[in-house]
Image (cartoon, rainbow, N blue to C red):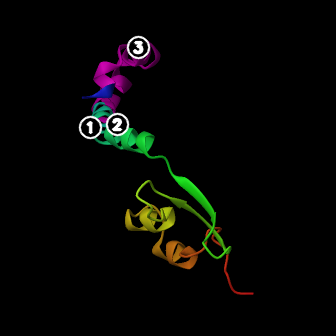
């Protein structure tokens, strides 16, 4: 499903707000985003709705363990995922790995 093609109101507004030349340039990008939103993101959103993340403030021994946990009980490490996806430098991800705040754990 392509959510851009399905959204008549968005297309109506864009046709009135953008000059025809700009709309012509934007349409392929909007079409691809609509496809990605419908085919890739929509199923992921549905899965997230079925099992939202859970915050664990302390581990079993009472030590601070603030990290997001997925529905499957695995730690969600957004910086490591962002680094592997190329969204941030690996130096940033590796320097903050294992800390919940991104600060150094040594004193």
In the image, taking residue 61 as reference, residue 94 lies left or right, namely left
Relative height, residue 8 to residue 96 (above, below): above
The nearer-to-camera label among 3 and 1 is 1
Q: Are marks 3 and 2 in contact (CB under 8 Å)?
A: no
Q: What element carries label 2?
A: helix
Q: What element carries label 3?
A: helix
Q: What is the x, y in percent for residue 52?
A: 48, 46
Q: What element carries label 1?
A: helix
Residue, x 49% and y 65% (percent of image)?
77
The magenta region covers: 4-30
Between 2 and 65, which is closer to the camera in this rendering? 65
Provide the residue designation for mark 1. 39
Q: What is the x, y in percent for residue 48?
A: 42, 44
Q: Do the residues labelled 2 and 1 touch (CB within 8 Å)?
A: yes
Between 61 and 101, which is closer to the camera in this rendering? 61
User: Which label belongs to residue 42?
Assistant: 2
Give the overall secondary structure of the magenta segment.
Answer: helix
Which image quarter holds the C terminus? bottom right
CA–CA distance between discs 3 and 2?
19 Å
Provide the residue designation for mark 3. 9
Residue, x 35% and y 14% (percent of image)?
8
The image quarter containing residue 23 is top left
The image quarter containing residue 44 is top left
* Magenta run includes residue 11: yes
Q: Please report whichever mark, 3 or 1, sits nearer to the chain's N-terminal start.
A: 3
CA–CA distance between discs 2 and 1?
6 Å
């Amino acid at each position: 499903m392509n959510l851009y093609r399905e959204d008549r109101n968005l297309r109506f507004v864009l046709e009135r707000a953008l000059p025809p030349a700009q709309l012509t340039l934007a349409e392929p990008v909007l079409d691809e985003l609509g496809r990605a939103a419908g085919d890739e993101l929509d199923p992921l959103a549905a899965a997230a709705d079925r099992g939202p993340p859970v915050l664990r403030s302390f581990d079993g021994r009472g030590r601070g363990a603030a990290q997001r946990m997925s529905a499957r009980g695995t730690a969600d490490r957004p910086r490591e995922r962002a680094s592997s996806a190329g969204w941030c430098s690996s130096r940033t991800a590796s320097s903050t790995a294992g800390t919940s705040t991104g600060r150094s754990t040594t004193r």
